[in-house]
Amino acid sequence: MKKKILYIEDNEQNLYLITFILEKHGYEVCAARDGQEGIDSAAKVRPDLILLDIQLPLMDGYAVARQLRTNPDLARIPIVAVTSYAMAGDRDKALAVGCNGYIEKPINPDTFMQQVEQHLATSN
């Protein structure tokens, strides 16, 4: 059975690129375009991994991660921030709200799958 990855991202180009890469490597990708849709999708789909943009409309990724971590059914799903926030302290802030990892945008297609698969391995 294919592993499911939920990607919460509002930017169409980023969504297309990462979905393309993940599907090419055999993963099923579910997309959400804002924080609340992401939280609702996570509860419905129960993905193996959540990739989370931080700069989202309505609710930022930090609030999304905090809310996902309060749901006992979703609390064990790894969350990886995929973000252009790359200033000192941004990684720590993402980890502090419950993210398990942090990938900077623009992603490096050569190392992106390795990073994703590391986090999927910890979800088993």
Image (tube, helix red, strand yellow):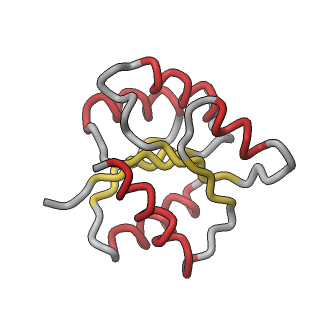
Q: Is 73 or 29 nearer to us in this picture?
A: 73
Q: Which residue is farthest right? A: 88
The N terminus, quarter of image: bottom left
Quarter residue 62 falls in: top right
In the visual, does 119 lie left or right of 1?
right
Quarter residue 121 falls in: bottom left
Q: Which residue is farthest bottom? A: 110
Looking at the image, residue 54 lies above or below residue 87: above
Looking at the image, residue 96 lies above or below residue 90: above
Q: How far across and down, in percent of the image, does residue 118 sit?
A: 44, 62
Residue located 28% across and 50% down the image: 124
Q: How far across and down, in percent of the image, does residue 5 sit?
A: 35, 52
Residue located 54% across and 31% down the image: 65
Residue located 33% across and 56% down the image: 29
Q: How far across and down, in percent of the image, does residue 72 sit?
A: 34, 20
Counting the numbered discs, the total is 0
In the visual, does 2 lie left or right of 7?
left
In the visual, does 28 lie left or right of 117?
left
Residue located 35% across and 34% down the image: 42
Looking at the image, residue 42 lies above or below residue 50: above
Quarter residue 56 falls in: top right
